[in-house]
């Protein structure tokens, strides 16, 4: 019998192929034949109470330099099945889609009419081959109480920097939902001393971005994490270009809006996103909300596409207290439309928890050790008025807000103040910052300056500098948080350990050690 545990062990496709009597039986490690079009695996995402998105992208040669995965330049029919059991004895939905070369032979099956709060299994067939099996879930029905949300989140997966073991460890927890908070790929060219060699150089065009995504999806640990649970994703800078802000790139060549359009197209092709997120050239609306019964709303934010340019210097970096531009009242990191949307989401929320999935530090952070102060103009410290409008909304609407953040390649936990410029200001939210999957190498549990940074930022309660992810269990009574760390990612298969645990309770926006 095929089980969720067998998905983790990598053997699901063996049993399914044998049970169906169709398609060659593949070994547990998926030693795929040359003609196998499913070398990028399968994924699901965007769960609602009655639906979910199923995804695959056909590729017979994931590292083909043209970014098209070695596929023929013609449409390919793809069949799909959704079942209520692992052995596909109870197929509840099935159908066919067309994988087209102009979409890099990607497939997005957008389902509705499913049972709320249900577990399903899915697979695809194309070119005489059967895909691996994926597991997915629909969200609980609106107003449902008593159904917890087991949510894991991480960010920053640099292929050259190490092995994607954190994905495997996250999959072993069998979460209900995985949130990826930016930098799913890195656009950089080749490193001088990579842990793993990437295919292609710097991503500058559509072929380059498609190739980079394909190499990530071909990774077995990545495939495992995508197959175990539905994902929701937002980008950060490296998904497009380091340090971009709105329409302004870090480097002028190639022309940025064309490069951004290519990156957006590849991002959509390679993620289990809905048609509502299909790009229109250099524009793609990524902010949206995922609802989990009466327990939680997850508001996914885009802090890149609509932000004002970096305060004082025009480039991302650290600025001192004399940088007054960061306090200008009209500055925004979300853009006016997204700010208004988020305000409405918080105002109308009836869930116990409101989670904000986003990219960069929201709470104030003095990054200068000792004398003097230094603030990142890339994070919300560069957009103080924008942050104050958000914290005012959280406070006014009396929401139990928890901010989920990526970007900085280390674990942090702290408390967001109503106004960080007021020493007496109360806490209105908790912020949980995940480390990276691989970016910045193995890291350390603590650095020489860690304790100084914590002393100078007393609202920050925790730090760990290893790679990993954050695991949460969210109920109406509490949010349990485990920071999961790995001692190394420069070698594969390191175990994960819990480097810190906290509990957050409704009505109390502070961190309590578990």
Image: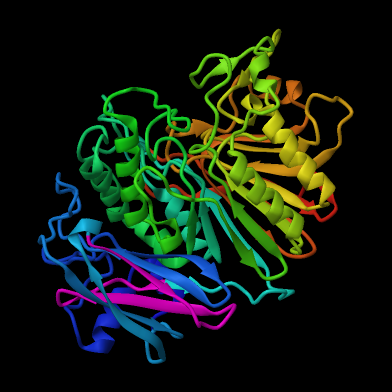
Judged left or right of residue 420, residue 296 is left
In the image, 372 versus 512, the foreground residue is 372
Question: Residue at 47% across / 33% down in the picture?
Answer: 246
Q: Dividing the picture into quarters, in which one does residue 261 lie?
A: top left
Q: Position of residue 369 (x, y in %)?
A: 66, 14
The coloring applied to the image is: rainbow
Residue 363 seen in the current view: no
Please tell me which residue is depicted at 60% across the width and 14% down the height of the picture.
319
**Picture layout, residue 268 above or below residue 380:** below
**Residue at position x 42%, y 39% from top?**
438
* Residue 298 drawn above or below residue 412: below
- State the extent of the magenta-drawn residues as a range: 105-134
**Relative to 387, residue 482 above or below:** below
Q: Say if the magenta span includes residue 475.
A: no
Q: Quadrant of the N terminus?
A: bottom left
Where is residue 465? Give x, y as percent: 56, 33
């Amino acid at each position: 019998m095929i089980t969720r545990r067998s998905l983790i062990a990598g053997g699901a496709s063996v049993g399914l192929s044998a049970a169906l009597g169709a398609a060659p039986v593949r070994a547990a490690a998926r030693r795929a034949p040359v003609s196998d079009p499913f070398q990028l695996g399968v994924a699901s995402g965007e769960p609602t109470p009655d639906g979910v998105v199923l995804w695959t992208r056909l590729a017979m040669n994931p590292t083909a330099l043209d970014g098209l995965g070695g596929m023929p330049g013609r449409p390919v029919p793809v069949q799909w099945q959704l079942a209520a059991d692992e052995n596909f004895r109870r197929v509840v939905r099935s159908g066919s889609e067309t994988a087209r070369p102009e979409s890099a032979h990607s497939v997005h099956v957008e389902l509705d009419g499913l049972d709320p709060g249900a577990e399903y299994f899915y697979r695809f067939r194309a070119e005489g081959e059967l895909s691996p099996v994926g597991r997915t879930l629909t969200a609980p029905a609106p107003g449902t109480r008593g159904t917890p949300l087991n949510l894991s989140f991480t960010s920053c997966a640099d292929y050259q920097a190490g092995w994607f073991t954190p994905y495997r460890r996250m999959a072993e927890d069998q979460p209900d939902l995985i949130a990826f908070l930016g930098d799913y790929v890195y656009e950089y060219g080749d490193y001088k001393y990579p842990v793993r060699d990437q295919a292609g150089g710097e991503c500058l065009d559509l072929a380059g971005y498609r190739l980079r995504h394909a190499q990530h999806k071909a990774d077995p640990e990545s495939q495992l994490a995508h197959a175990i649970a539905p994902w929701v994703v937002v980008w950060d800078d490296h998904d497009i270009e380091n340090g971009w802000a709105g329409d302004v790139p870090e480097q002028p060549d190639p022309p940025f809006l064309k490069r951004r359009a290519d990156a957006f197209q590849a991002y959509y092709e390679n993620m289990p996103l809905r048609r509502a997120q299909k790009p229109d050239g250099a524009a793609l609306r990524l902010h949206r909300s995922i609802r989990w019964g009466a327990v939680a709303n997850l508001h996914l934010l885009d802090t890149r596409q609509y932000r004002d340019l970096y305060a004082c210097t025009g480039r991302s970096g650290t600025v001192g207290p004399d940088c007054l531009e960061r306090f200008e009242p009209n500055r925004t990191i979300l853009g006016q439309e997204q700010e208004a949307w988020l305000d409405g989401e918080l105002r109308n929320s009836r869930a116990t928890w409101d989670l904000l999935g986003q990219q960069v530090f929201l709470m104030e952070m003095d990054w200068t050790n000792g004398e003097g102060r230094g603030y990142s103009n890339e994070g919300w410290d560069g957009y103080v008025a924008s942050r104050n409008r958000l914290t005012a909304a959280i406070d006014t609407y009396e929401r139990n807000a928890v901010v989920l953040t990526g970007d900085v390649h280390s674990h942090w936990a702290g408390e967001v103040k109503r106004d960080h410029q007021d020493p007496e200001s109360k806490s209105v939210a908790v912020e949980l910052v995940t480390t990276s999957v691989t970016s910045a190498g193995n890291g350390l549990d603590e650095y020489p300056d860690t304790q100084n940074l914590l002393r100078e930022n007393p609202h920050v309660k925790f730090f760990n500098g290893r790679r990993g992810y954050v695991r949460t269990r969210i109920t109406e009574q509490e949010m349990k948080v485990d920071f999961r760390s790995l001692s190394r990612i420069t070698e594969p298969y390191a175990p994960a350990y819990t480097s810190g645990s906290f509990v957050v309770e409704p009505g109390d926006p502070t961190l309590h050690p578990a």
